[in-house]
Image: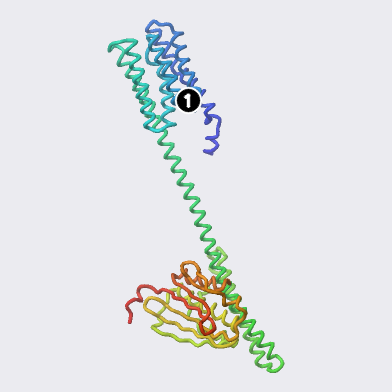
Amino acid sequence: MFNHLRRGPWARPQMVDPAVMVGCFALFVPVMAATAYHRQTPVSWSVGGLALSCVPLLVRSRRPVGVVAATLVVNVTLTLLLPVPGPSFASTAFALYAVATRTNRRTAWRVTACAAAALVAAAQLSRPGLADLWQTLAHVAGLFLAVASGDAVRSRRRLLASAIERAERAERTKEEEARQRVTEERLRIARELHDVIAHHITLVNAQAGVAHHLMRTDPDHAYQALERIRDTSRSALDELRATVGLLRHTDAPETPREPAPGLAGLAALLDSFHHTGLTVAVERTGPADELPPITDLTAYRIIQEALTNTRKHAGPGTARLHLDYRTDALHLTVEDDGLRTTPAHSRHRGPVVGPAGIHGTGTGHGMIGMHERAKAAGGTLTAGPRPGGGFRTAAELPLPARRKGRP
């Protein structure tokens, strides 16, 4: 609505300036006529002089300082020729108001001081003495009042424009923050989906291969493999349902809210790999105190992704998991011998440096997800080929300060 008002015909200079000129003339015509009649001077001269001084106001908005000079010349001339001081100063006052609203404060007051000095000097030259000086000073005070009003309007407009700019900037910042939050949430859900799908699909693929191999020679073991496929797929569906539930913007009580996985479920995770032929030797050092939720989930997902990569690229065999609970950080390491390594492009690219100093290899989504998880938890992750063969994934996840100082 305010934009529409600002775009109205009365807000355009070509419409406002003529209206100001007519208003100034109409407002002071009675004053000039009465003053001329009282001083017994021709009324037509006074009214004509007022009209002549108001003509420059047609370009008041475009050339305010020039209009002040033009009205000042007319008023000084009228003051010197006619014995009617004062009311014709109105056009100069309107012009000075425009200067105050469209220029800086210093320029406005300098122009006003020069105009006042010129008018006072002209009045003293026309009518020397103190008889009419007070009337002239009163009219000069009107000029200063017009400038003060214009300066107040300019300051108010500046404050309003600054407030609008701050509001627009805040709105833009709010939109950018909202987009950033959406992006971060999308990446987080993408990591969860990747971890769930990659892990379970790798297990299902390995168990399906076992079942296919034993179907004719050992149906009982093949049946057990199919049961594990069923259990693994059911677990995958449950985790997918919980992850996809994050996309629902609802707080309904019937919405499932399953706990996030953590190291408490490490035994079940390792058992699922054991059924696919990957044996994981676990070593723990240090006091295994309760971990913060983000550290617990990050450690679980990194171990899950590292073992999934081991099973996918190195095949059945043996892997080693070392959990070192220190006073300030949790260090975890997953290693394998890589006796059945797939082509080099899948795992053994040269080392690369990721964001925030994170070093790693490979360009798959799983490796990127581990880097992002470690960084989100405030830690670091290093992954790459071992000197003697195989692959090594190591992460350092900081622990709260409350753990510091414990024996």
Q: Nearer the viewer, residue 360 or 220?
A: 360
- Looking at the image, the residue that sits furthest to the right is 216
Q: Using the rendered view, name the quadrant where residue 305 is placed.
A: bottom right
Q: Where does residue 160 sit, x and y in percent of width and height?
A: 44, 40
The answer to whether residue 238 shows anywhere in this view is yes
Instruction: Give the left or right position of residue 267, taking residue 407 as reference.
Output: right
Residue 353 position, x and y percent, is: 50, 69
Q: Nearer the viewer, residue 114 or 2?
A: 114
SS type, badge 1: loop
From this view, report whether residue 235 is shown above or below residue 161: below
Residue 14 lies, with reference to residue 286, above or below; the image says above
Coloring basis for residues: rainbow
* Amino acid tagged 1: Arg
| Up-down relation of residue 298 to residue 22 (above or below) | below
In this picture, residue 147 sits left or right of residue 176: left
Residue picked out by circle 1: 60
| Point 45% across, 82% down: residue | 323
Quadrant of the frame with the N terminus: top right
- Residue 249 horizontal/vertical position (percent): 55, 63
Q: Nearer the viewer, residue 351 or 205?
A: 351
**What is the number of callouts on the image?**
1
Find residue 233 and report its horizontal and vertical position in percent: 62, 79
For the question of whether residue 275 can be seen, the reply is: no
Q: Residue furthest left?
A: 130
Residue count near mark 1 (Cα–Cα under 10 Å), binned few <14, some 14–19, many ≥20: many
Which residue occupies 30% across, 10% down? 128
Residue 38: which quarter of the image? Answer: top left
Residue at 38% across, 27% down: 147
